[in-house]
Amino acid sequence: MNIASPEGVAAQADAINTAPARNDDAVRVDLWLREFDGLYRFYLPQPQMNELERLCGERGIFQIYGGLTAGRYSLGDQPVNMPHEGQASARDIFETVRLGLIGGAVGLVNGERIVVTAQTASSLVDTYLRPSPLERAWNIAFAILDARINGRAATKQEIAAGGDSRTAVVPDDEAAE
């Protein structure tokens, strides 16, 4: 079926209208990862997505995501990376992580809540990722964009707190550190 035909357009509209809602309290587009020297929140709100697109050669967010996705597979429940098939640049990877930290704006280090500034984010990327194998940074960048594009299931704690991904909800098991 030609998607530009009236039937194709109608089929697309039906698919969109019957798709599950992705903007409810059960879906989030931020995530918490234990990386670097603590637990950090990663989130790409619109200003950081715009900056990522600009820094990555004016490519759209889906093009950047496609580059990060290339070379990634699953074997059962296990992820399998084939970096020789990857299409992401080092800039795509490092900037996704840096801007995700800036957008996330918060972390827990030694049980203390910290504010993540642009300077903090740059320092974390420069200290922990740039000197390390790229595959680690590739995995983090993929997780950030995958959460932003596809969403992730909200935890019970996040649902109880209400709101959406614009509000940081520290995971329960980490708040007691």
Image (cartoon, helix red, strand yellow):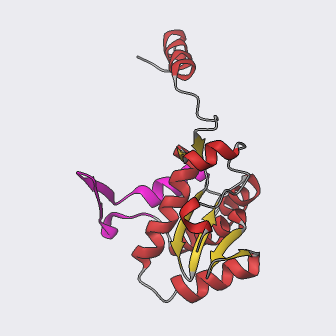
In this view, the residue in front, 92 or 74, is 74
Q: Which span is picked out in magenta?
A: 60-87
- Residue 65 seen by the camera: yes
- Residue 56 seen by the camera: no
Q: Residue furthest top?
A: 7
Q: Is residue 83 above or below residue 43?
A: below
Q: Residue furthest front?
A: 176
Q: Where on the picture, by quarter, is residue 49? A: bottom right
The question of residue 75 being in magenta is answered with yes
Q: Position of residue 160 (x, y in %)?
A: 65, 43
Q: Is residue 24 above or below residue 50?
A: above
Q: Is residue 133 above or below residue 99?
A: below
**The N terminus - image quarter:** top left
In this view, the residue in front, 22 or 2, is 22
**The C terminus - image quarter:** bottom right
Residue at the location (49% across, 59% down)? 143
The question of residue 66 being in magenta is answered with yes
* Left or right placement of residue 15 versus residue 79 in this view: right
Q: Position of residue 169 (x, y in %)?
A: 67, 56
